[in-house]
Amino acid sequence: MAVWAEDEAGPYQTKPYPGAGWRPVGHPACQAHEYVRQGTAKMLTLFHPSDGRLRVKGVLQATNAVLHPWLKEQCMAILSTLPEPPILKAEPQAALWPRWQQGLTHPITLPEQLPPLRMLLVWDNLAGHLTADRVLWLIAHGIMPLYTPLGGSWLNMTESIQRIIVRRALDGQAPEIPQQIIHALEATAQHWNQEPTPFVWGGPRAARRQRSRQRRQVLGGSGACIHRVTRQRANLLDKWIRSNQTTH
């Protein structure tokens, strides 16, 4: 089953952005000491973590009137590339949908007639993502929306790839109009897709963190840990007493 994640990033202002850039030796990039606000740009993103593929569109605003048509177009394009779902009976097919809502406080009210489940869509718990017409359209096309909990937007891996794209596109640049920001974001995403990097939760980094936690020593009487065993150190008063005893 395909798993895609969606998020909107921005706004990004028309201003100089700090950062390194590629320039000829002896000819550093020069930026103005002042700038004029000429508007902002945002980025709509669909991310496929298993292979790193990315779908990006730069926009001036990310309202529902802009987001929903773009999302519908991209979802239809993704579904057209997926293999046909296996033919199952009605009851086993309907049982696949509630499985992804187990443990939720407010599960989605699913319709009685459910199509084959073909795709999972992870996105934030925003008001524009909860509209009835949008949710019903996704379900009618075999897409199950999964909402990240409040305060848990970091569970959406799209935010991670957005930070990478924005740094590569805007660091060291000084866009003067929003269209330059849009062009930089979309061009960077195209170059990323030429050799995408798959994203995996956990992996070697999580294993290193686990080993590091195991190497720490717990401090007695508290929940804190230290990285190494500390030696008992005498305070200044003990040192003064010992020095006097040695002298006399």
Image (spheres, rainbow, N blue to C red):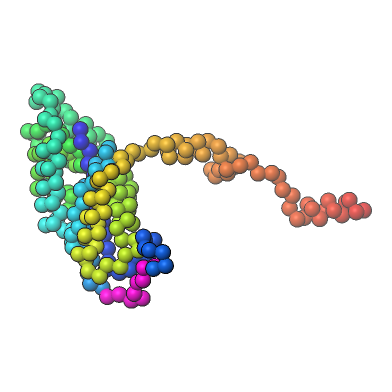
Residue sitting at x 23%, y 72%: 38
Q: Nearer the viewer, residue 106 or 79?
A: 79
Q: Is residue 159 left or right of residue 111?
A: right
Indicate the quadrant where residue 96 lies.
top left
The quadrant the N terminus occupies is top left
Q: Is residue 132 visible?
A: no
- Expressed as whole percent of the image width and height from the top left, the position of residue 66 reads 13, 57
Residue sitting at x 11%, y 57%: 65
State the count of labels. 0
- Expressed as whole percent of the image width and height from the top left, the position of residue 130 reads 17, 49
Q: Main secondary structure of the magenta part?
A: loop
Q: Residue furthest top?
A: 89
Q: Is residue 170 left or right of residue 231?
A: left
Residue sitting at x 22%, y 38%: 3
Q: Nearer the viewer, residue 43 or 147?
A: 43
- Expressed as whole percent of the image width and height from the top left, the position of residue 91 reads 11, 25
Q: Is residue 88 visible?
A: yes
Q: Nearer the viewer, residue 207 or 191?
A: 191
30 in the magenta segment: yes
Which region shows up in magenta? 28-36
- Expressed as whole percent of the image width and height from the top left, the position of residue 118 reads 15, 34
Q: Residue furthest right?
A: 248
Residue sitting at x 15%, y 54%: 67
